[in-house]
Image: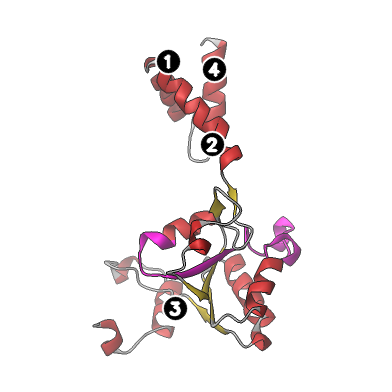
């Protein structure tokens, strides 16, 4: 394999979810395209870190100092949904159901990995809570570390006066009970709602 192609394949294979075979297919595909397409891709990648950063207010992706979620006056600034990573905001927005603001921790508590409160984006969150939020929605993952993070934050802001809620867990839409694990079923039973609420 020519050295330049091998280098491209090596770089592509370093991406998450891309194995050696997929990396080789992508590299060959890039080689078969017009040179202008490859140059355009290289330029877009080169500008990525220059043009995309993180919002100084919430920590989400931003092209300027503040993201468009924080700048949107139509959103409820008094309701904040707390997530672990910026990509979680993109996933939440796909549902089109949340019209508040976000706050990104950029991680979760994980003693094994050496991640404590000081490694998370908590200073900005403290300021937001102190400014008088109505509700803080904890939308961390359902992993052990995610749950530990949610418990830590709930305790941290217990005396702040803000309403602290947790996103529901349980049976997914269209899910079959026989394929669910016992922890998911237990969580679904614990967080059951009245029939009237589910039929709206």
The numbered mark, 3 or 1, whose residue comes first in the sequence reads 1
Residue on which disc 1 sits: 35
Q: Position of residue 85 (x, y in %)?
A: 56, 57
Name the residue at the front extreme.
73
Residue on which disc 3 sits: 187
- Residue 49 lies in quadrant: top right
Q: Is residue 111 magenta?
A: yes
Q: Residue 15 carries which label?
A: 2
Residue, x 51% and y 16% (percent of image)? 5
Neighbour tally class for label 1: few under 14, some 14-19, many 20 plus, Cα within 10 Å: few
Tell me the mark number nearer the camera, choosing from 2 and 3: 2
Q: Does the magenta stretch include residue 30?
A: no
Q: Distance between the residues labelled 1 and 4?
A: 18 Å
The residue closer to the viewer here, 4 or 82, is 82
Q: Residue 95 carries which label?
A: none
- Indicate the secondary structure of the residue bearing disc 4: helix
Question: Does 31 sit above or below residue 186?
Answer: above
Q: Position of residue 112 (x, y in %)?
A: 71, 59
- Indicate the secondary structure of the residue bearing disc 3: helix
Q: Can residue 86 be seen in the rendering of this structure?
A: yes
Neighbour tally class for label 3: few under 14, some 14-19, many 20 plus, Cα within 10 Å: some
Q: How far apart are marks 2 and 3 (CA)?
A: 34 Å
Question: Does 7 sit above or below residue 83?
Answer: above
Q: Distance between the residues labelled 4 and 3?
A: 48 Å
Residue on which disc 4 sits: 6
The numbered mark, 4 or 3, whose residue comes first in the sequence reads 4
């Amino acid at each position: 394999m020519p050295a330049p192609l091998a280098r491209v394949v090596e770089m592509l294979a370093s991406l998450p979810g891309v194995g050696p075979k997929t990396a080789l297919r992508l590299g060959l595909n890039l080689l078969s395209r017009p040179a202008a397409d490859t140059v355009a891709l290289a330029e877009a990648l080169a500008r990525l870190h220059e043009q995309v950063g993180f919002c100084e207010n919430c920590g989400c992706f931003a092209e300027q100092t503040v993201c468009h979620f924080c700048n949107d006056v139509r959103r409820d600034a008094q309701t904040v949904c707390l997530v672990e990573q910026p990509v979680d905001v993109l996933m939440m927005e796909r549902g089109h159901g949340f019209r508040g603001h976000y706050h990104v921790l950029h991680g979760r508590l994980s003693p094994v990995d050496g991640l404590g409160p000081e490694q998370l984006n908590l200073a900005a969150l403290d300021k937001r809570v102190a400014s008088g939020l109505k509700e803080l929605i904890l939308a961390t993952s359902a992993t052990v570390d995610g749950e530990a993070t949610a418990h830590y934050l709930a305790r941290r802001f217990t005396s702040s006066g803000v309403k602290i809620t947790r996103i529901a867990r349980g049976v997914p839409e269209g899910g079959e009970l026989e394929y669910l694990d016992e922890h998911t079923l237990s969580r679904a039973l614990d967080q059951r709602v009245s029939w009237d609420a589910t039929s709206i």
